């Protein structure tokens, strides 16, 4: 019996990805193909300044992309970290597992691999992202921001880089008509990051995870914190224990907050989406306000050509980040 396809994506801008992903599923595409198409749509949108082409660069002015894709069928996964000058990183990630015996490639060698796989060298900066970088650079007063000016005499701890406008990974979950699942995650990561920094997004179990018998999950938010709690893996395991997708996401975030209290670590937000094998979906975020322009945690669900935008749930309701200063 064919299953009703479902596609879920993080953030308000995930509506466009969910629409494309669901369309592909409704035409009979596999969950894996739908994830790749939806990821590519966002990666190629220059207006989304946190993913792919047009993403904001690192502290040295270079865009470094992180992406991963995981297939429930065969429990296969591929990932790239710190990929420069290459478009469609989620497709490169897919090639990693399809064309090599490995799971993750990083940095310059990931770029060379992409080149050999037919992904041409590309400039990822748009005039808008370049201007944003120049403006940000002016605020850094000539410091060696790429390395935080950290020398033996510098006792200042590195400052957090999470600001209202410098993040928003797209996380993606799909259930196809065969009842198979796949997930994806693609981002330019935290902007102004230290060159070489890889976030949670391409880390299997942190940025994304799928078990074809249970469900899938994907995350967005402060990756340096999220990757220490393996939140996507935990979400899927929570669903295995019988939680609904929303409960599963919320419990994983409560675990993160327990291990890394925001007061101590200033982690400004984390959010998860989940999709269960039976088509049930859910999402949760740490707070009722991200450091994000509209301050809302929103995610898109498509079970038809018109995706629905959900908000929440929030693990610590009522708490907004102004209170953190
Ligand atoms: C990172 N998790 O690089 C990404 C950023 C992000 O919403 O998702 N922000 O840490």
Image (spheres, grey):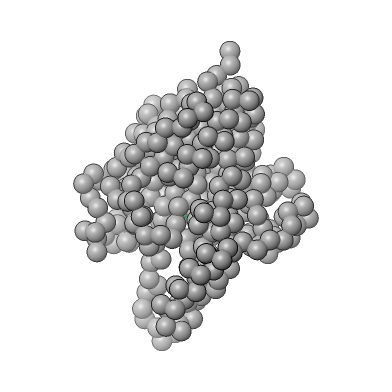
- Where the C terminus falls, by quadrant? bottom left
Residue furthest to the front: 127
x, y percent for residue 165: 40, 59
- Quick check: can you spot residue 250? no
* Residue 112 left/right relative to 41: right
Would you place residue 59 above or below residue 14 in this image?
Answer: below
Q: Position of residue 65 (x, y in %)?
A: 58, 58
The quarter of the displayed image where residue 292 is located: bottom left
Is the residue 94 above or below the residue 87 in the image?
A: above
| The one of 227 and 276 positioned closer to us in this rendering | 276
Residue under the image location 37 percent in, 29 percent down: 243
The x and y percentages for residue 235 are: 42, 38
Q: Is residue 18 above or below residue 258?
A: above
Snapshot quadrant of residue 242: top left
Residue at 68% in and 64% down: 108
Q: Residue at x 29, y 43 (%)?
A: 315
For the N terminus, the quadrant is top right
In the image, 215 versus 142, the foreground residue is 142
Please name the residue shown 66% across and 46% down the image. 91
Q: Is residue 141 visible?
A: yes
Residue 231: x and y in percent read 43, 45
């Amino acid at each position: 019996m064919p299953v009703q396809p479902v596609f879920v994506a993080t953030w308000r801008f995930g509506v466009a990805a969910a629409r494309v992903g669901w369309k592909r599923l409704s035409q009979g595409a596999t969950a894996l193909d739908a994830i790749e198409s939806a990821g590519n749509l966002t990666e190629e949108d220059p207006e989304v300044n946190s993913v792919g082409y047009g993403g904001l660069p690192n502290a040295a002015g270079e865009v470094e992309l992180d992406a991963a894709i995981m297939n429930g069928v065969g429990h296969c996964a591929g990932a790239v970290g710190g990929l420069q000058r290459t478009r469609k990183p989620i497709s490169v990630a897919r090639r990693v597992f399809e064309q090599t015996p490995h799971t993750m490639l990083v940095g310059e060698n990931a770029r060379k691999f992409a080149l050999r796989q037919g992904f041409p060298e590309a400039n990822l900066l748009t005039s808008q992202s370049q201007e944003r970088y120049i403006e940000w650079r002016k605020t850094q007063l000539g410091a060696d921001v790429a390395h935080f000016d950290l020398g033996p005499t510098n006792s200042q701890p590195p400052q957090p880089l999470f600001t209202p406008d410098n993040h928003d990974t797209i996380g993606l979950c799909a259930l196809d008509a065969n009842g198979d699942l796949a997930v994806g995650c693609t981002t330019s990561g935290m902007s102004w990051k230290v060159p070489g920094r890889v976030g949670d997004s391409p880390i299997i179990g942190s940025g994304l995870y799928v078990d074809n018998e249970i469900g899938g999950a994907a995350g967005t938010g402060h990756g340096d914190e999220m990757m220490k709690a393996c939140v996507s893996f935990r979400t899927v395991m929570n669903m295995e224990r019988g939680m609904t997708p929303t409960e599963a996401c919320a419990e994983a975030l409560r675990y993160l907050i327990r291990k890394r209290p925001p007061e101590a670590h200033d982690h400004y937000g984390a959010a998860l989406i989940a999709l269960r094998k039976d088509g049930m979906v859910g999402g949760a975020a740490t707070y009722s306000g991200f450091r994000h322009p509209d301050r809302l945690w929103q995610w898109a669900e498509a079970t038809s050509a018109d995706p629905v935008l959900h908000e929440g749930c929030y693990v610590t309701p009522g708490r907004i980040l102004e209170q953190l200063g």
